[in-house]
Image: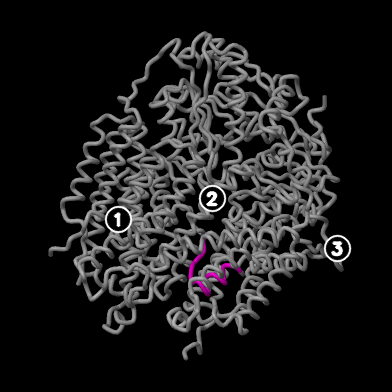
Amino acid sequence: MRNAAPFRGGWPAAGIGLLLFFPLSSPDAFFLDVFTTGFLLAAFAASWDVVGGVSGQITLGHALPFGAAAYACALLTSLAGWPLPLAVAAAIVLAAAVGAGIGTLSAPLAGPFVALLTLALGEIAHEAAVGNTFFSGPGGYAWGGEGGIPLTLPWRDASPFLSYYAALAFLCLASFGMLRFSRSGAGLILRAVAGSPITAQASGIPIARFKRLAFTVGSAFAGAAGAGFALHVGRATATDLSLELSFQAATFAAVGGRGTIVAPVVAALVLHVLFQGLSLPPSARILLYALTLLVTLRFFPGGVVGTARDLASRIAGREGARPPGRHGRNRNGEVAR
Amino acid sequence: MASPLPQILLDGFFTGGTYALMAAGMALILGVVKVINLSHGAFLTLGAYVAYALADRGIATPLAAAPLAAVIAFAFGVFLGKSFVNPARSHPFALPVGTLACALLFEQAAQMVWGPHPLSIDAGDPWIGPGGLVVRRWGVVAFLSSAVLLWGLKRVLSSRPGLPLRLIAEDEEIAGSLGMDVEAIRYLTFGGACAMAAAAGALLAPSGAVTPTMGRAPLLLSLVVVIVAGMDSVGAIFLISIGLGIFGSACAWLLSPQWSYVAMLAAVCLLLSARPAGIVALAGRRD
Amino acid sequence: MTVRPGKTLRLPLLLIGSAILFLQYFSPVYPAATAFAASHPDALKIGVLAPLSGPYAAGGTSFVQAATLAVEQANAEGGVFGQRVTIVVGDTQGRVDVAKAEALRLVSREKVTALVGAYLSEETVGVMEVAAAQRKVLVVPVAATAEITDMVRREYARYRYVFRVGYSLPQWADMIAAFLSDRKVRRYAFVGAGIRWNRELGEMIERIVAPRRIAPAYTAYYSPGNPAFDTVAVAASAASPDIVIIADPGRNSVSFLKRLREAAPAIPALSVGGALGDARLAASLPLSTPVYVQAAAWRGVSPAATAYVERYERRYGAPPVGYSDTLPYDAVTVLVAAWRKAGSAATEAVVPVLERGAFAGVAGTYRFDAAHQAHWGTAPGALRGTIVRLERGGARIVFPPR
């Protein structure tokens, strides 16, 4: 079996070290805020990778557990008056339960049908969030709908430094947890199921149970990211359940490299910080972002890490694969680069 | 006053025709090139803007705009196919994301050229049918065009010229070893599908407002129709579209207009749960 | 395992590292900003927060265009304290997290003196938190939710920097109800998007007109994601109302109006404002039956309004729609007037002046109540707004009668 980790201790530690010391060079509050959001989105992207990469089930509704946790935090703290830690814990549990539900529904499906089902479920949740006005705030006016629901937080204005470090700590812990999962026995089984469902089934693995597990774990981490996001922003809005957010997670995973957990984190962080932090004029920002995606995917179709790994294994001469020819096709009939 | 139900059903019928028209191009791409083309909505938008540009210059009929839009979109689609879709197809996951990026690019370019404000083309008066039924002009056009397009697609696929397409859809390696220029057929098909999307956009433009992001909702619906119906039967796509249109209209009337979209999505989820392999069973396709 | 990963595997982390270094080098790094009260700061910058990308880019773009025009007008009048006023724009992208980050950027990095924005309710509430923490005046032009003024009222000490120039939902309903009474409407249909503020507006109108024996014959909200226009148009027509109120300010209102005209060619329509106020659309809409549009101000309402409209048209090629442009213009105008009146741009000097004074804008004279809400509506001395009827060559003011 191929050595799974391209990153050994050194590089992630270097990256984390850079990020740890970055605020000490006293950047302004805006930059710290962009990084904080970036950390949370990176954790979200990694949680997508648990489902879509490790387990091979492309989900286009991953914003559902994210937003469900955000709304749970908002409703529990603002309407039910729960203390914050309890509300966050409940939100994560809810997200995991949502994931289990999605996993159950999608287990008999494969390929584009999973994508369609998750997309439909996400859109249903988004519509429900936009259309609901069931709750009312202290002033007697309606809450919810497109405007979202505020959280009641024990702090007023969080220090940007504290937010930054809290989000970074969360990202490191969550990534560590997801990496452990993806390399555990369950994770290996999931990769096997993703690679060849028929073989896996023939060896007696309860596929449906493991697919559901992938969704549950991925959704739990997505819910944690969603709760963190709600804490950071102070509000749960319908955008937290939007299709655009679901697509964003899939995009980060595609650019970084599916199945590695770490690569989507890096891709999310780099893309988010670059494009939100550089304060480009809006049209330039979107054009550059789209072009970056296109160019990256054109030359690194397996993601930056995925394509690099292909190259590395070819250079090392594994499994009889020849180095990519100049014009020809490789063994599988694909045009090699 | 007579019950509006016949009107509701007729409108649902025509709305379904709209869905079929939007889905036609998506089906071609998914079937032959095996790509979920998320820039489909952007090409639809391109077609609508071409129709607007022509209307602005005095040529207000979308029937003239549709061929022009198709040609322009074909060129863009071939370019996209050659430069991105073909080279990146060793990794099927990169393709939808890349086409999504392309859609973002188109939307932003459209916003920069025409501005973000909603624009509009004159829809013309509707025809009044028997019993006071209002027959929407653009609805009829969409329905007829979708029928023609899908029928043409079916004919091409089942006849000699369509043989390479079907073979590539089944097995690219064999097609390649038979001497077919798989690359060229792929990007030409991609271009053709984009042309269909743009023609659809031009024909549908008068019915509403033209904005840079107008293609997002049709993209979603096309995806739903094409994935649910499966690639094996063009007729299934047409029927599913009509069914979805009528279902949506009926839900809006009987339930509530706010939740008709949710009802449609829930119906799709139920369908998927009931028939996990898609509506059209993949029976009898083994050699 | 001696796999030689090669340099490419280090690429991602190198990218992060270089990105961070690049950002640090190219973007000047400031120490965390501490609030300072300066009577005459070096430059007078107004931070404008609006969505310039995403689904609300149309409203946000007119917002920024109008704000630019207002600042140019202020400079043409000699500036403020002899200095030029400039605007710095932040694109909120229609999201709360980005709105807050951009507000932070404008305050901590660009050192703006005051903020104007945002567009959506949730964005505005997020920006309010930043304005409160940084003690900057925030003038809210649109965003009609009651939450904003409720926060000012409940926690005055924290949110007293926030002033709303645009109309609140009850005021909006009041102005629409006045028009319904004026047209002698008995039954109306209310069609909106299934979003919170559309529903609230509908409920408020119903409540206000009930004593006047005006009642809704049909109420419906369509899903903004996949609007069921056909069904709603048919049902609205079947209810035979005297007028159909279209509450959606966005692009869906255009599509819905077309459907409505097909189903009911003879029923007048009233739009609450927004997309249908765009003169460029008039050529493609059936206008034989009246289509009314509500706006904050229109050409002909006053000399100031006419001058503004003509300047806007000359500069941007099309006249303003009267809501997402006119209100931001007045927001900037009121802010600048308050600076001049206070003799200082310092927050602590400006807030009491705004609370007590009267300020001339395009829509009329702005005065703020205890919750820092401008007086709109039918009460004496309040801003009245305008309702116009769309016509091929432009639009004609029909209410309030002159």
Q: In the picture, which quadrant includes the C terminus of chain A?
A: bottom left
* Neighbours of disc 2 within 10 Å: few (<14), some (14-19), many (20+): many
The kind of residue tagged 1 is Ala
Please state the chain letter of the residue tagged with numbered disc 2 in the rendered image: A
Relative horizontal placement of residue A224, taking residue B81 as reference (left or right) = left
Viewer-side residue, A113 vs A309: A309
The residue that appears at 39% across and 27% down in the rendered structure is C109
User: Magenta: predominant secondary structure element?
Assistant: helix
- Tally the numbered discs: 3
Q: Disc 2 marks which residue? A: A130
Residue C237 image position (x, y, % from top left): 79, 54
Q: Disc 1 marks which residue? A: A263
Could you give the CA–CA distance between mark 2 and mark 1, rounded to whole angstroms?
A: 33 Å
Viewer-side residue, C137 vs C144: C137
Please state the chain letter of the residue tagged with numbered disc 1 in the rendered image: A
| Residue C369 in the image: above or below residue B53 | above
Relative horizontal placement of residue B53, taking residue A182 as reference (left or right) = right
Mark positioned earlier in the residue sequence (2 or 1): 2
The kind of residue tagged 3 is Ile
Q: Secondary structure at mark 2?
A: helix
Residue B84 image position (x, y, % from top left): 46, 61
The region drawn magenta spans B25-38
Residue C378 image position (x, y, % from top left): 72, 27
Observer able to see residue C241: yes
* Neighbours of disc 3 within 10 Å: few (<14), some (14-19), many (20+): few
Residue B189 image position (x, y, % from top left): 56, 70
Could you give the CA–CA distance between mark 2 and mark 3, rounded to whole angstroms?
A: 37 Å
Relative horizontal placement of residue C169, taking residue C117 as reference (left or right) = right
The kind of residue tagged 2 is Val
Which label number is shown at residue B128? 3
| Residue C326 in the image: above or below residue C285 | above
